[in-house]
Amino acid sequence: MNGAAVFPQHKVFAGGSAEIRMGDFMKTKLVSAIQLQEVEMQPADKPQKTFSVEEAVETIGFGRFHILLFIIMGSANIVEAMEIMLLAVVSPEIRCEWHLEDWQVALVSTMVFLGFMVCGVLAGYLADRYGRWTVVFGGFVWSAYFSLLTSFAPSYGWFIFLRSMVGCWNVFTRGFSLSDNIFWMLGSMLIIILGMLVVPTWGWRWMIRISVTPSIILLFLFQFIPESARYNVSAGNMAAAVETLQRIAKMNRASLPPGELLEPRVEQRGNWRILLGSSFRTTSLLLWFSWFVASFIYYGSVLGSSELLEKNLLCLTDPDGEHLVKHRNEDGLCYCIAFQLSDYQTLLISCLGEVALVPVNICLLNVLGRKMSLTVLQLGAAILFMMLNICTTMFGFTVLLFLLRSLVAMNFNVVYIYTAEVYPTAARSLGMGFCTSFSRIGGMIAPFIAQVLMSQSVISALTPFAVSCVFCALGNFLLPIETRGRALQVINTDAFSTFKES
């Protein structure tokens, strides 16, 4: 009986334990469901605000930093313009000192542009890899050093070698904006004035030594320019980009947008395949030819005008006694025909043409766009090149040269603006480097047309410049992309997909 009594009690105890365990399990499930419901009902965290470099620049606005940048980069244009115009001013002096033939004088300019061409692509590649500031600053140190050494050249061979070294790193300054024409003109006029004041008394060597002074000053001013924020973003260095933007904002007494700087990192930087991908192949090829012609006609007009004045090759209806002395005479060559005061004055007035028609250039860009502006400017330059062969007065020649310098300078500006706008940030410096190298090829050829062929026949020397303008105008009309009103491209997905597939 007792065993029978215990057994039923054991069964009751076991069944109660099972019910208790089942109840605990249900309670646990119920609590978990309630907690899950509470979590779902809680409001989600607000996404963190972000901003791009473009938005930061818009928020900071224009201020003291941009004024300082304008002055420093404008001064860089002054330095480069002096180095280029120096070739035209010093040509009569070195011809006289070393009794140089026409091709030897032309070879000096060609070697300078050879240095431009060789280092142009390399500098673009290094700028995309290591930053814009480093390459530009190093380039000015290099060019100032070798420019000073040029004034001590003991022979023609040393002179040509040192000038080619000057050209090797003198890149990335020409054409930052239309307003830079003012600084370029100032540099051209400054070296002409130095030639007019210094060469007749102290000689061409002291003119070069004095002309290095602005380069030395510029090296100290470059310390106030930070690295490009866009470059730092494309390199994935967000901290450096934010530091640059904060520095600009502080100088402008502004602040950055709230949030975190966020832009995709560009992995493929500085690769030439981007330029020849499906998105940019036609544009790149046409731009290379356009830069070639832009440089060819610009330096052709500069060197050609000095050659016409030095050798008195102009067809003048009112020549004075100074312009009756010819380079080629029955008795042989006259090596020492120095620039006269009137020649320096003509060169000075022609330099003014590079800024006098800037308002016209702005109107063309806004009304016609980039492509049509290039076409119109190059067709106008072709006409003016041929008009230089017309017999006229000295005043008439000065007016024609003034207009020609205006058009070729405006053409250089527009082609630079278009190139900077059409390429994405990841390939902009490399694209500019390639274009610059092709422009240097034009600069290499121009001296042999403007300084060698000009002595044989004026019309034969002017025709290649005019014909190249016509063909280039057609090429610019066929450019596939119009950049007027388009924001700067950070990365082109089509270009990079083509790069990856290749």
Image: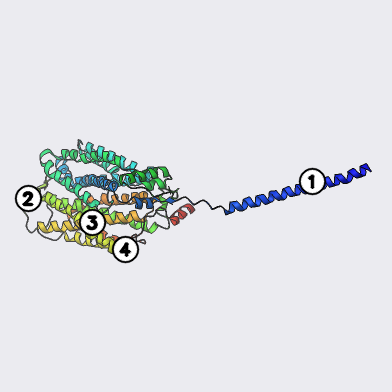
Residue plotted at (64% across, 52% down): 34
2 and 3 marks in contact (CB < 8 Å): no
Q: In this rendered view, identify the residue nearer to me: 404 or 466.
A: 404
Residue plotted at (41% across, 43% down): 239
- Tell me if mark 3 has few (under 14), some (14-19) or many (20+) residues whose alpha carbon lies within 10 angstroms of its own: many
- Amino acid carrying label 4: it is Phe
- Amino acid carrying label 3: it is Val
Decide if residue 93 is on the left or right side of residue 143. Answer: left
Secondary-structure class at tag 2: helix
- Tell me if mark 4 has few (under 14), some (14-19) or many (20+) residues whose alpha carbon lies within 10 angstroms of its own: some
Residue position for label 1? 17
Secondary-structure class at tag 3: helix
Residue position for label 2? 322
Above or below for 384 versus 443: below
Secondary-structure class at tag 1: helix
Q: Alpha carbon of mark 2 to alpha carbon of mark 3: how far?
A: 29 Å
Specify the color scheme. Answer: rainbow
Q: Alpha carbon of mark 3 to alpha carbon of mark 1: how far?
A: 101 Å
Q: Alpha carbon of mark 1 to alpha carbon of mark 2: how far?
A: 127 Å
| Quadrant in the picture for the N terminus | top right
- The mark lying in front, picked from 4 and 1, is 1
- Amino acid carrying label 2: it is Glu
Residue position for label 3? 408
Q: Earlier in the sequence, mark 2 or mark 3?
A: 2
Q: From the top left corner, tell me how far across and down residue 357 is, in percent.
A: 20, 58
Secondary-structure class at tag 4: helix
Residue 477, label in figure = 4
- Amino acid carrying label 1: it is Ser
Q: Is residue 122 in sight in this rendering? A: no
- The mark lying in front, picked from 2 and 3, is 3
Above or below for 378 versus 341: below
Q: From the top left corner, tell me how far across and down residue 368 is, in percent.
A: 28, 64
